[in-house]
Amino acid sequence: MSTPETKNAPPGGTIIVPSFTKAICDEAEHASDAYFLAEHSTPGLLLRIGARFKTWIVRRKLLGTTRKLSIGRYPAMLPDVARKKAARALLNMSDGIHPKADLRTRRDEADAERVTKEWTLEKLWKIYTGEDVEPDQPKVRRDPLADNTLKSMERAWNKLVGTGLLKRPAAQIGVNDILKAYDDMIARTDPKRSHAGGHTQAAQAMRYVRAVLRYGLKEKIPGNLPDPFESIPERQMWKQPGAKTRTVIDKEGGLAKWWKAVEALRGQEDGRAQAQDMIADWLILTLLWGTRSRSELLPLEWKHIDFENRSAIIPKTKTTPREIPYGPYAAKILKKRFEAEDRDKKWIFPATRTGKTDKTHLKEPKKTLEKIIKASGIDFTAHDLRRTFGTLLGETGASFYQTKAAMHQAAGGDVTAKHYMRIRLKALRRVFENLEAAILEEAGVTA
């Protein structure tokens, strides 16, 4: 039904129509000075007629102030649809809720849901290890992870691939998902290649999942979601490997037997042209310095040795570089190695296979270690020598903080030790020299 009044509507004025129809909306002429059409049967619903657009408006008093909300344009939104949308908006406004607030809430919820789904365990894992880089972030790891840790996490990743856990949104991972993934890893383990039935590797993989998941829930995923690992019943918790405590001094006279078997290597060849005296030097320095098995001492280069000040820098550790003020017996070993090797060589313990000498360093010689174990009757690994080092530190009278410093272990949550207590290299040298003398005495060696 046509309304002649719309042709001469006053600027900013409102014309009441019985009911919005397509004909009325079409015939309302655009004007440079906008005016409104209002429907008698739906108070609060207006059609704003401007110079270019016809816009549906909801208008109502909210908390003492008249509020307006645009809900769509004509003809994209027809009168029947406009009435339904206006009814919802007016109902919210009657309850004191501005419709835009509801829209913002729904938009925020949708954004949160989208972000939550994007953060899969796989994506968090790659950011945690430094493989993936977040937008506008420098290409550095979240925290400095040791190379051995990264290799261990890579093995855990390969175990997790077949479980489906990596592809799952981290926020949706629950207790049942975790336990199922653990059982799947064990079920896919070859019993011939794993004496523990896969439990040890599966447990290690789950510890990495826990670390990555906790990082994601804290740093990346909104909503302060609970950690599902905290809800795993104790009876269902996977087997945790026990702490290793073995040393070469567990038995009386063990150190002397071990040292004798190591010294017996000198002058021998192992069939792969690896100089056994170099392996003997590596094992003795590992014991005297308390280094972490293969990762710290074997890659050492001559540039890391300061002969004048009798100190060595271990650049690759679990945390920061480590400085060792070594004793006189260690100095004799290093001097002998330096004089025996071509001085142009890079490594202190170079690989001795043909064609490999200048390219890499010695790797852990497992067959030689087995030979020492057989000759001495002392079962050990290179890391057992670090535990022996730590045990003997206490026996020689080193304090708790001296032991921590000598072993290059973090102070943890102890604020005083972390920020205020520093042990100078001069004081630490006495610790290493006392320990070296005690080791040589127990081994029956004349320095």
Image (spheres, helix red, strand yellow):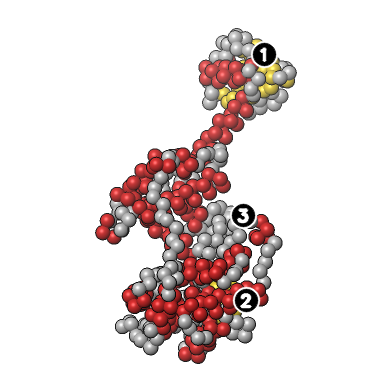
Lateral position of residue 13 relative to residue 352, left or right: right
**Labels in figure, total:** 3
Residue 169, horizontal then vertical, whole percent: 45, 43
Q: Secondary structure at mark 1?
A: strand
Instruction: Judge whether 120 appears above or below 303 on screen.
Output: above
Position of the N terminus, as image quadrant, is top right
Query: What mark, if any, has residue 15 been given in the picture?
Result: 1
Separation of marks 2 and 3 at Cα, in angstroms: 27 Å
Q: Nearer the viewer, mark 1 or mark 2?
A: 2
Separation of marks 1 and 3 at Cα, in angstroms: 74 Å
Along the viewing direction, whichever of 209 and 109 lies nearer the viewer: 209
Q: Are marks 2 and 3 in contact (CB under 8 Å)?
A: no
Sequence-earlier tag: 1 or 2:
1
Q: Nearer the viewer, mark 2 or mark 3?
A: 2
Q: Which residue is mark 3?
A: 413
Separation of marks 1 and 2 at Cα, in angstroms: 98 Å
Q: Secondary structure at mark 3?
A: loop
The amino acid type found where label 1 is placed reads Ile
Residue 365, horizontal then vertical, whole percent: 38, 75
Along the viewing direction, whichever of 236 and 443 lies nearer the viewer: 443
Residue 190, horizontal then vertical, whole percent: 27, 56
The amino acid type found where label 3 is placed reads Gly
Q: Which residue is mark 2?
A: 430
Q: Nearer the viewer, mark 1 or mark 3?
A: 3
Residue placed at 51% from the left, 37% from the top?
113
Residue 226 is at least partly visible in this image: yes
* Quadrant assignment, res 409: bottom right
Residue placed at 65% from the left, 60% from the top?
418
Query: What mark, if any, has residue 256 been given in the picture?
Result: none
Badge 2, how many Cα within 10 Å: few under 14, some, many 20+? Answer: some
* Quadrant assignment, res 37: top right
